[in-house]
Image: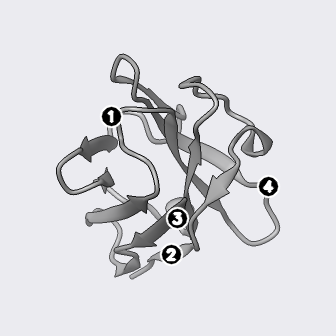
Amino acid sequence: VQLQASGGGLVQPGGSLRLSCAVSGFTLDEGAIAWFRQAPGKERERVSCLSTSDGSTYYADSVKDRFTISRDNTKGTVYLQMNSLQPEDTAVYYCAARLYDSLCYTRSSAFRFWGQGTQVTVSS
């Protein structure tokens, strides 16, 4: 099982980015896929999650209505579209997978498989 995150970068406040998480070793119709982020000096927090069993999506209050998680089963990729980015969104973003079931836990310890992080910096 492997996850490969990409798409981070530097963007001005109000801008947009789309992160991608390419997965291998499993299909996107099993488990739960989440995006976490960790800012310097802060704990890792779950930003969004997709439950593949029924397509349910979950968002942290801080990103609701700005971020959208989606998947492309044919490409084996999960996306995080991030709009109206603010400086407080600056962090390293990670994608993670839980394959035991498709429950979207908020704690990072519930997700066994992780991609490398991709840096998102929102600054003018």
Q: Which residue is mark 2?
A: 118
The residues bearing labels 2 and 1 have C-alpha atoms spaced at a distance of 22 Å
The type of residue carrying mark 3 is Gln
- Kind of residue indicated by mark 2: Thr
* Residue 62 vs residue 110, the one in the foreground: 110
Rounded to the nearest angstrom, the CA distance separating label 4 from label 3 is 23 Å
Q: Are marks 3 and 1 in contact (CB under 8 Å)?
A: no
Decide: few, some or many residues near mark 1? Use Cα within 10 Å; few <14, some 14-19, many ≥20.
Answer: few
Callout 2: 10 Å neighbours few (<14), some, many (20+)? Answer: many
| Mark in the foreground, 2 or 1 | 2
User: Residue 2 shows which numbered tag?
Assistant: 3
Mark sitting earlier along the chain (2/4)? 4
Determine crowd level at label 4: few under 14, some 14-19, many 20+ residues with C-alpha closer than 10 A: few
Q: Which quadrant of the structure image shows residue 57?
A: top left
Q: Is residue 90 above or below residue 69?
A: below
Label 3 or label 1, whichever lies nearer to me, is 3
Mark positioned earlier in the residue sequence (2 or 1): 1
Name the mark on residue 65.
1
Q: Quadrant of the C terminus?
A: bottom left
**Residue at image x 45%, y 41%?**
63
Identify the residue at horizontal 54%, vertical 44% (top origin). 47
